Image: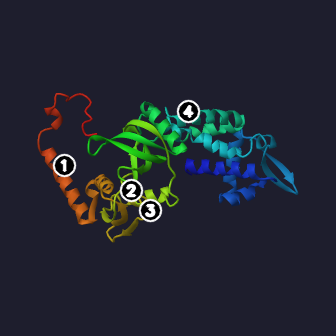
Amino acid sequence: MARGDQLGRQWRIIQTLISSTRGRSAAELAEELECHPRTLYLDLEALQVAGFPLFTDRVEGKSLWSVLDTVKHHIPVPFSLTELMALYFSRDMLKVFRDTVFYDSLESLFKKIKTTIPPESLKYLEQVQQTLHVRIKPFKDYARFRGIIERVSDTAIKKRSIEIVYYTMSRKKESRRRVDPYRVWFFNGTFYLIGHCHTRDEVRIFALDRIKMLRETKDTFEIPEDFSLEDFLRPSLGVYQGEPVRVRIWFSPDVTGYIKEKIWHESQKITPNDDGSIVFEAEVAGTDEIRFWVMSWGSHAEVLEPVSLRDAIRSEAEMMASRYEGPIVAEQSPAYGRTNNHFL
């Protein structure tokens, strides 16, 4: 039996008993959790050993399992014990926000939660945490950009237009923009500002750490009623925006399991072939992001459509091959032997 299955089942036992007004028999719990009664008794015993205050009481000839009322009533409305435990359990996932105003507030919240959760419940939770570790990479050191994150969040709340100097990575240059900040968005290790750019007269995405200067104006704005963040982000594979493009990509049998186990795009369609390979189809926003994704699979992926994307990847592959035919570029540089981030 997988350890994750056991923990999940024990978590459901706690939730069920805390929410129950009369308790549950072992047979009822086993049926609800779809497990063997012997397995259920082992879980109950493990929870008691962990210090959780479970007890049995005879009611109308049945032995009903319950959680001590002192635990049930220890939690302030509107949170239940398991809701607070789940939130406290999420600390590892939220460490990526360290050194930002968001994490400072979360740390304060976690301290309050810790004093609210009964000792026996906290002890069990800490035991569970030893079996699961969450690590999110890559992410950026946002301590350097704390001020920008706070100011953008503040102007978004107040609905104040801002003027920024923004560094565009693709063009390697700075430009001055006037933006109405709609949302602060965290995706794949990076904070972004989504807002209406007056220069382009359209909703654009800006990486917060590339904002070199920010000035709050006295002008206010209103987010259009027909603007939907979900609709705006839906076509993109990640961050990049562009005209909708239908793509068809072949994947070899060696990687089909990895492709099929995730939802890469809401519009995706996967068609299996007799030889074990698959064809992945989706309608994405532009081809820049999908090009990087396809190339990450190396020779196990081949673009079938559109021809323009196929040609772009062929050209990129030829450049890569020629790079490896000559001498190592870094050896030609006086910086060789030191950290070299020229590619980034």
Question: Which residue extends farthest right?
Answer: 60
Tag 3–tag 2 contact (CB < 8 Å)? no
Q: Can residue 262 be seen in this snapshot?
A: no
- Which of the numbered marks, if any, corresponds to residue 266? 3
Looking at the rendering, which quadrant does residue 324 occupy?
top left
Looking at the rendering, which quadrant does residue 173 occupy?
top left
- Which of the numbered marks, if any, corresponds to residue 58? none
Tell me the SS state at disc 1: helix
- Which of the numbered marks, if any, corresponds to residue 237? 2
x, y percentage for residue 225?
Answer: 53, 59
Q: Name the residue under label 4.
A: 104
Tag 4–tag 2 contact (CB < 8 Å)? no
Q: Residue at x 67, y 48 (%)?
A: 43
**Label 1 vs 4, first from the N-terminus:** 4
Q: Which residue is drawn at 62% across and 44% down?
A: 86
Q: Which amino acid lies under the numbered mark 2 shown in the image of this protein?
A: Leu
